[in-house]
Image: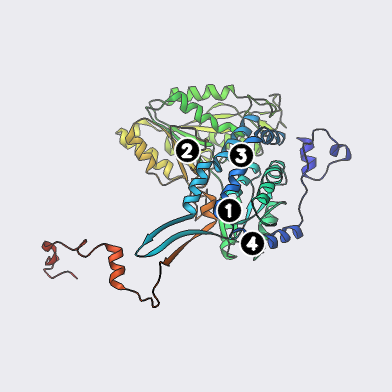
Amino acid sequence: MALKARLDCANATASDLADARLAGRVALSTPEQGNAALRLARRAGEEWRRVPMQRRLAFVAAVYDALCERADDVVDVLVSEGHPVRVARWELTVALSLIHPETLEHARQSLEWRTEQAGRHIRLVRKPDGVVGLNAARNAGFLSSAFGLLVLAAGNALIVNAPPTAPLAVAFLYHELVAPLLDRHGAPPGTLSVLCSPSRSAVQQWLGSPDCDDIFYYGPARHGARLEAECLEHGKKPVLELSGNDAMVVWRDADLERSATAAAERYYGSGQLCIAPKFVVAHPDVADEFTALLHRRVAELRVGPPEDPDVVLSAVVKRGECLDVLRDAVEQGAEHLCGGELVDVHDKVTARGPFVRPVLLRVHGLATARRMCAVREETFFPLMCVVVPDQADHATPEHLLTDILEFVDSNRYGLRNSLWARDPHVIERFCDMGNGGVLKVNDSHIGCLPVLPTVGGTGLSGGTFGEANLPYLRTTRLQGISVTIDPPRTQVFDHHAAVHAATGPPGAHRRPESEKHSTNEEGTAPT
C-alpha cells in the first residue's frame, strides 16, 4: 500500500520503479493528446457510423470470444490491481453478459426496425450521437470501461479515460483485445482512443470541445448533479452512472438460506460496488432467523491477499467515513452485531490498517431507519443494516407489505432492488415499483444476465434522465424513415388513403347506432 501511494503521488524512488511487484505501466496522457483524440474521433466517427451494423456487432462478438479465450489473463491483471480473485471472476462474468450473443441480438433488433405500411417502407433507426467520452470508474475501471464496447457497436467513436490510480486493466482490455479487433473489422484510426488523466480534467476538456457529443460519467451523485447541469449548458448529452443505495426485501415465506447468501454479496470488494445491496428489510416473522444466518456468513469472511480464492474483501478507501457512519448508527439505537475494526492483511488490528472487518447492524423500525445515515445514504464500505419493521405498527400483512414497499420506493437512489418471496401477490406488488433501474426476484443481487441492464437507475443513481442503461440506446437517437414504393410522377397526399391505413376499412371503428344521438348531462348533443 505504501509503494502504491508513492507511485500514485509521483513520489517514487529509483528503487520503487525497479520493484519486482510492479505489474505494469500505463503512460499518463497530456491535454494535447486529449484534443488530438477528439479531432480524430470526429473524423473517424463519420466513417464508422456508415459501417454496416452487422459488421459492428460482429466486431463486439469477436471481443466476446477474445475475452473468453483470455479469461485467465484478464483475471490476473485485475488481481494485480488488488481485486480479490473471486471478485475479479465476477467482474469478468458481468463484462461477458454485457456483450453476450443474446445481448447483441437485442441490440440488432433495437437499433433498426422495419415494416411496410400503405405502400411504404417504414424504418425506425437509432442513429449514433457521434463522439462519446467515457470516464471509467476508479473502483471498477475494467468493468465500467467495458460499456464502451456497446457504444462502439451503436456506431459512435469512443474516447475512454482510464483512472490514473488503476489504469492497467482498462489498458489491457482495449490495447490487447479491442483495438486489434476494431482494426480488423474496418474501423478507421481514431474510432477508439484510450487516455489516462485525472477525471476532472478529462471531463472539462470534453465539455469545452465541439467534437464531443456525449459524456458517459461514473462518479458520486453529488458530482453527477453538477455535471448534468454543465452538460446541458454546453449542449452535451449526459449518461450518468452515479451512487447506489440498493435495498433487499426478505418476506416471511422467503428461502432464508439463499437470501442470506445473496445479502452477503454486500461485502464483495468490501462493499465498494455500486450494485451491491446496502440494506435489508426483513419481515418480523423471519428477521431473527435471517439475521442469524447472515451473521454466520459475515463472521466467516476474512481479509487476505487478493490471490486467495476464499477472500472477497479488499482494501477500503473510505475507512474514516465507515467508522463515522457506524458510530452514528449505534448512537441512534442500531444493534452492533459485529465488525468495524481496522486490520492489516493478516487480520491484525492496527490503527493504520487498510482493511475494515465487515460490519453488520440490526435496526428496529422503519421510522428509525429513515433517520439513519447508514440506511438513508449510499455506504461505500463493508457495512450492512438489517431493518426490521415493528409488527405492532401494522394491522394486517397487506399494510406491512405496503409500508415496506413504500419505504423502498421512496429511496432517493434507484440503482437496483431485490426481493425474496414466494407469494405471487407480493412479487407482483414489488415489480410494480418505479424505483430502480433493475428489479430482481429470488436471485443474486449482484448477478448479471444477458440483455438485462447491468447498471443505470433513477433519482440520485442516474440523474434527471436516469433509467436502466443499455449503452446502445443511451448513446443513440431515434429517427423515423418512410420510403414510398414505386412512387408515381406526381405524389399527392391522399387523406382518405391515410385514414384507411391508420384505422382500417370503412366502418371498422364506426360508433354503434345507440351512441349516435346520445346526450350529455345537460341534455345537449355532445360535440
Name the residue tied to disc 2.
247
Label 4 – label 2 distance at C-alpha: 34 Å
Name the residue tied to disc 3.
65
Q: How crowded is mark 2: few (under 14 residues within 10 Å), some or many (20 or more)?
A: many
Label 1 – label 3 distance at C-alpha: 34 Å
User: Where's residue 253, x and y in %?
Assistant: 37, 27
Name the residue tied to disc 1.
224
Name the residue tied to disc 4.
207
Circle 4/circle 2 CB separation < 8 Å: no
User: Where's residue 98, x and y in %?
Assistant: 55, 43
Q: Earlier in the sequence, mark 1 or mark 3?
A: 3
User: Where's residue 124, x and y in %?
Assistant: 45, 59
Q: How crowded is mark 3: few (under 14 residues within 10 Å), some or many (20 or more)?
A: some
Q: Residues within 10 Å of mark 4 (few under 14, many from 20)?
A: many
Q: How crowded is mark 1: few (under 14 residues within 10 Å), some or many (20 or more)?
A: many
Dot 4 falls on a residue whose secondary structure is: helix
Name the colouring of the figure: rainbow
Quarter location, residue 394: top left
Label 2 – label 3 distance at C-alpha: 35 Å
Q: Earlier in the sequence, mark 4 or mark 2?
A: 4
Q: Amino acid type of disc 1?
A: Gly
Q: Amino acid type of disc 4?
A: Leu
Q: Earlier in the sequence, mark 3 or mark 4?
A: 3
